[in-house]
Image (spheres, rainbow, N blue to C red):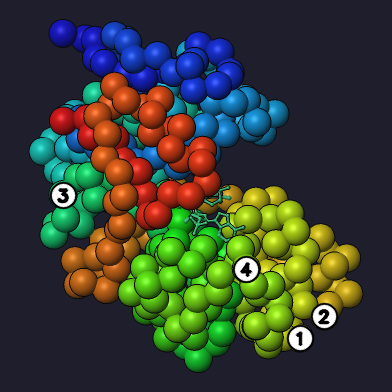
Amino acid sequence: MNTMKAVRIHAYGGPEVLRYEEVLRPEPGPGEVLIRVHAAGVNPVDWKIREGYLKQMLHHSLPLIPGWDVSGVVAAMGPGAVRLKAGDEVYSRPDIARDGAYAEYIVVGETEVALKPKTIDHVHAAAIPLAALTAWQSLFDAAGLGAGQKVLIHAAAGGVGSFAVQLAKWKGAQVIGTASKGNHDFVRNLGADEAIDYQTTRFEDMVRDVDVVFDTIAGETQKRSWKVLKKGGILVSILGQPSAEEAAAHGVRQASVFVQPSAMQLDEIAKLVDSGKLRPIVETVLPLAEARRAQELSQTGHTRGKIVLRVV
Ligand SMILES: NC(=O)c1ccc[n+]([C@@H]2O[C@H](COP(=O)([O-])OP(=O)(O)OC[C@H]3O[C@@H](n4cnc5c(N)ncnc54)[C@H](OP(=O)(O)O)[C@@H]3O)[C@@H](O)[C@H]2O)c1
């Protein structure tokens, strides 16, 4: 059978445009692998793309299968793909310009695929790639976070934040996270030294001389973050380019990160998971057919850890 079940959008819009339907199974081209999807992670970018917010940037053609986090098993190799073999258990943050993983099968460039952590199941592995790579590339590649430095992580209880807290702690940094009160024990258990309730407290009154601000919120939160940085510190945002003028006025640096696929970094992350130093937090698991509910939950902006769709 060359068809499969998938969730697609045929037009941009609200959650109702997500359709669970029978579609053609994709074929791997040169340098690509076909993955039997076992689980697909859900991220805010999925509903942002669905709403059409990123159409100027990403130029998708519709219909489109959303979902750029996958864990599954290699089903077939395209011509010239030699790094992996059929039966390998893998995970990936695939190319966001192409069809995603809300489906029984996905085709992914083999340079974007790594062997999944051995000690966790596919549901937990699918929660990792996009959010953990974002945290890794922001804290380590963009900010150069090192041992003994102080980092303020906004939305520390969310998908990206829950990895950022653990990765920063693993590096030996002093970690301060913002979250609502009900998430403070959770954030401390992940390794944060301090949790600030952003709903009742102005974080800029509590924090100073920070080496790195990790901005996962933008807007007012970003504007108020400049003053907590020490001179020469850096604000890294994952929601667009922060103002170079503001950075200069505060004597600090700024950077913007849009997460890139990386099999090499996923290999490093898998080692951390298998050695017990990093754990994905999965709050909700839903069947593929309930992708609409998953995106509605994600859109509330209050996910603790991750939401994952189970496909097998
Ligand atoms: N540039 C990139 O490559 C990239 C990659 C990944 C994500 N992103 C973007 O980064 C953002 C975060 O992604 P995510 O996956 O972590 O989202 P998420 O999992 O949906 O984040 C939910 C978390 O945000 C917290 N939160 C909400 N408002 C807050 C505030 N004002 N201050 C502090 N915490 C707050 C909530 O905590 P409480 O429930 O305690 O309020 C909740 O735990 C999204 O906009 C996403 O699109 C960008």
Q: Name the mark nearer the viewer: 3 or 4.
A: 4
Q: In the rendered structure, which amino acid carries the disc numbered 4?
A: Thr
| Residue on which the image places disc 4 | 200
The CA span between labels 3 and 4 is: 38 Å
In the picture, measured across the screen, residue 194 lies left or right of residue 86, that is: right
Q: Which residue is at the far bottom?
A: 148
Residue 112 horizontal/vertical position (percent): 37, 45
Residue 211 horizontal/vertical position (percent): 63, 82
Q: Is residue 96 above or below residue 213?
A: above
Q: In the rendered structure, which amino acid carries the disc numbered 1?
A: Lys
Instruction: Tell me the quarter of the picture where residue 254 sits.
Output: bottom right
| Residue on which the image places disc 1 | 231
Earlier residue among tags 2 and 4: 4
Residue 18 horizontal/vertical position (percent): 44, 18
Q: In the rendered structure, which amino acid carries the disc numbered 2?
A: Gly
Instruction: Specify few, some or many for label 3: CA neighbours under 10 Å numbering under 14, 14-19, or 20 or more.
Output: some
Q: Which residue is drawn at the image coordinates 50% and 76% (left, top)?
A: 195
